[in-house]
Image: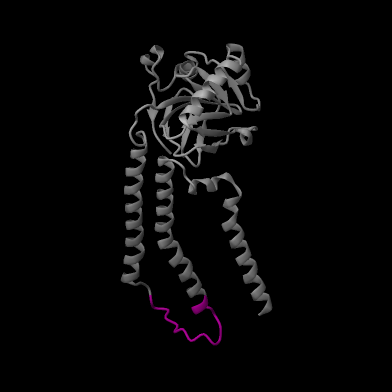
Amino acid sequence: MQKRTGTYTLIAALCATLFLLPGCGEQVLVFHPVGPVGQVEKQMIILSIVMVSIVVIPVIALLWVIVVRYRDTPDNPTPYRPEWSESRTLEFLWWAVPIVIIGVLGFVTVQKTFALVRPPGKVINPLTIQVTSLDWKWLFQYPGQKIATVNYCEIPANRPIEFVLTSNAPMNSFWVPQLGGQEYTMPGMAMKLWLEADQPGVYFGSGANFSGEGFSHMHFHVIARPQSDFDHWVQRIKSTAPPLTTQQYAVLAQRTIVQPMSFSTNQPGLFEKIVSQDGGMYMRRDLMKGKVNTHVGTD
């Protein structure tokens, strides 16, 4: 009896450890969203957990009941029924319930996902940021402000941000848990992701797709500021940071790990050049006129 109690205690401890482990990483931040996209995705996650629990919890409870009730012991009073084969009521339950759950989850997921393809709220004055994943760093270009940063980006709070994403390295995935995401970055392709921060703050971002030896260093911070502070930051970068030259970009494109960097200028057409190299799988002629033909999607 003492041995059995020790076994149950060990199992309970292991279950508790598995339950607490997700809190050790940044991923738990998805449950503390600070933007409209993050709020919608949190609702979808919670709905999925609730709907799946409708099946998982009864199954675990029934497993325990079956193990206890039908265990092979001399004093077990449960009747032995070797001829019993089926129950139409049970068959209906374990087919109907999963079908309903899948239907509800599918309907809500499609509806919410397609809604997230469009900008959150009313777009009055969106900010466009061109994002390129490199080995093993992130390059952020601000075509409207004509500046660039590496491994961090600043945005104005309460303003929709249009992230246009590509890769000049292996495929990766752009993810800012508290704001929403994630969206793939792929060579020869420009993807679009709309995000917005409801309040100023510093938000963790990361590459969420394994991309080689330096993958663990592909993280960045999104710094949301009031619009006036953002404008001051732009002017400060313009007046103090070095320009992003062709030679500097060639250095960035190498397989290296770097600290956050700022550049007072960006190269006009650099993002389009990165996307269209090797033929640009999803590019049209209007790209060469300065317009990025984006393939829109969310994950």
Q: Residue at x 36, y 64 (%)?
A: 94
At a point 32% along the width and 57% down the height, the residue shown is 100
Q: Residue at x 44, y 84 (%)?
A: 79
Q: Residue at x 32, y 61 (%)?
A: 96
Residue 7 at x, y percent in the picture = 65, 71
Dominant SS in magenta: loop
Q: Is residue 252 left or right of residue 228?
A: right
On the rendered structure, is 216 left or right of 182? right
* Colouring scheme applied when the structure was drawn: one colour
Q: Is residue 139 above or below residue 98?
A: above
The residue nearer to you, when weighing 216 against 187, is 216
Q: Is residue 70 visible?
A: no
The x and y percentages for residue 207 are: 55, 35
Q: Residue 177 in the image: state x and y as whole percent.
A: 50, 41
**One can see residue 14 in this view:** yes
* Residue 74 lies within the magenta run: yes
Q: Identify whether 225 is placed above or below 238.
A: below
Name the one closer to the observer, 268 or 174.
268
Q: Nearer the viewer, residue 74 or 102?
A: 102
Name the image quarter holding the C terminus.
Answer: top left
Read off the magenta span: 68-84
Taking 210 as reference, is 103 above or below it? below
Q: How many marks?
A: 0
Please provide percent x and percent y for residue 33: 47, 44
Q: Quadrant of the N terminus?
A: bottom right
117 or 157, nearer to the observer: 157
- Residue 284 colored in magenta in the image: no
Q: Quadrant of residue 162?
A: top left
